[in-house]
Every structure is written in structure tokens, then in C-alpha cells.
Image (spheres, grey):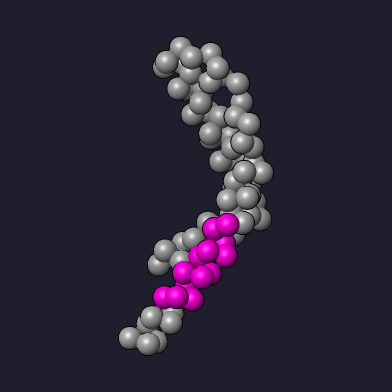
Amino acid sequence: MFGLVSVGWGAMYLFNLRGTADKAAARRNAGRAVSAARTMDLSLTEPSQLGAWFFRLMGGFMLPAGLVLCLVGLVLMVEG
């Protein structure tokens, strides 16, 4: 199951399906703004340096890792 979920999320982030990576970057910046308001730390009001490219990079790692997990799960299921 973890492999299938990882493949799904990895594909969404890597290929930016429905703007997933852009939404994640915007959500991160919104969270930083809320934290800045709570803690009165003005350095958090600046946008994060990690943009949509970071989430696409993470999707690039998640997709192949999920495929490997699926393969391992299938091998264990067939052998067991």
C-alpha cells in the first residue's frame, strides 16, 4: 500500500498534476506567514526559498521509490 501511495503522490508532484507542486509551495508560504504572525518573527514573512521545484524534485524521488516498494511487495507476496 505504501508503494502505491508513493507512486501516486510522486506522480502528482513530479508532473505537477492539477498544480499540486504549486499548491504545496503556496501552502508552505501561507503556513510560514501564520507562524510569523504567531511568533512575531519577521524573517518568516519572506517567501520560502523552496518553491515548486523542490516539491517536483521530491516527487522525482518518491515515484521510483514507490515503484521499488511495489516490486518488493509483489515479490514477497508471490514468494510467501
Percent of width and height locating residue 38: 41, 17
Residue bounds of the magenta highlight: 61-73
Nearer to me, 16 or 70: 70
**Any part of residue 52 in sight:** yes
Residue 11, image x and y in percent?
A: 59, 59
Where is 10 relative to 78, above or below?
above
For the C terminus, the quadrant is: bottom left
The answer to whether residue 13 is visible is no
Task: State the residue lying farthest toward the left.
Answer: 80
Residue at (48, 14) in percent of width and height = 41
Residue found farthest to the bottom: 79
Magenta stretch containing residue 64, yes or no? yes
- Quarter of the image for residue 10 reads bottom right
Nearer to me, 48 or 30: 48
Q: Position of residue 29 (x, y in %)?
A: 56, 29
Quarter containing the N terminus? bottom left
Compared to 80, does 69 lie above or below? above
* x 66%, y 55%: residue: 15
Query: Which residue is rendered at x = 49% and y = 60% of the image?
Result: 6
Q: In terms of secondary structure, what is the magenta stretch mainly?
A: helix
